[in-house]
Amino acid sequence: MDSIYRNHYEEKETNPMILLKKNIILLLSRWYALQMAIENQWGGYDSLHKSHQLAADLFSLFSKSNALIPIEDLENLLHECMLFTFNTEIEDGSIEQVAEQLLIIHEEYLSPQSS
């Protein structure tokens, strides 16, 4: 009974802004390199706060842009954030993967906007 209620209660989010924010947070929460940086406090005692700031910065960038952000810009932003904020160089290819996923998230956000 609980699972039936839960499935009924968990309706699909329809507000594009909320969906954008949730998708960015979800993606960053699954990024292993970032999670390791937070867990090990590579960015200092406030590493968790800094990861929240990255999510907020991405949300701001995407929600204010009416055109897709070039993937190179996203890769540079992520690289600089990891290097300067978390004092770590990421060379496992995950920056490119996360940038590609962010591009998809942004594209999904823009598609209902253009309708």
Image: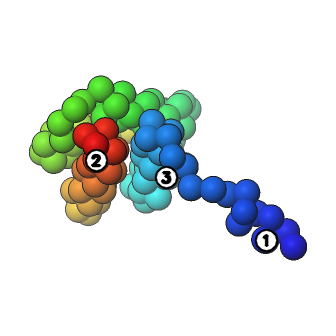
Q: Amino acid at mark 3?
A: Leu
Q: Which numbered disc, 1 or 3, marks the residue that appears first in the sequence?
A: 1
Q: Position of residue 62 (x, y in %)?
A: 31, 35
Give the residue at x 49% y 35%: 52
Q: Which numbered dot is residue 111? A: 2
Give the residue drawn at x 30%, y 26%.
Answer: 64
Which of pointers 1 and 2 indicates the residue nearer the eye?
2
Give the crowd class for mark 3: few <14, some 14-19, many >=20 residues within 10 Å.
Answer: few
Q: Are marks 2 and 3 in contact (CB under 8 Å)?
A: no
Going from N to C along the chain, the mark reached first, 2 or 3, is 3
Q: Which mark is residue 68?
A: none
Provide the secondary structure element on which disc 2 rests. helix
Q: Which residue is mark 3?
A: 26
Q: Callout 1: helix, strand or loop?
A: helix
Residue 3 shows which numbered tag?
1
Query: Relative to 115, is 46 above or below?
Result: above
Report which quarter residue 79 is drawn in: top left
Query: Which of the colour schemes (rainbow, by chain, secondary structure, one colour) is used?
Result: rainbow
Crowding near pointer 1: few (<14 within 10 Å), some, many (20+)?
few
Q: Position of residue 63 (x, y in %)?
A: 34, 31
Q: CA distance from mark 1 to mark 3?
A: 22 Å
Q: Position of residue 24 (x, y in %)?
A: 42, 46
C-alpha span from label 1 to label 2: 32 Å
Residue 45 visible in this rendered orientation of the protein: yes
Point 28% across, 43% down: residue: 115
Left or right of 1 on screen, residue 34: left
Which residue is painted at 43% across and 31% down in the image? 56
Task: Compare residues 57 and 84 and report the one nearer the observer.
Answer: 57
Judging depth in this view, the residue of 83 and 71 nearest the camera is 71
Give the residue type at disc 1: Ser
Task: In this rendered view, identify the residue nearer to me: 23 or 77.
Answer: 23
First in residue order: circle 1 vs circle 2: 1
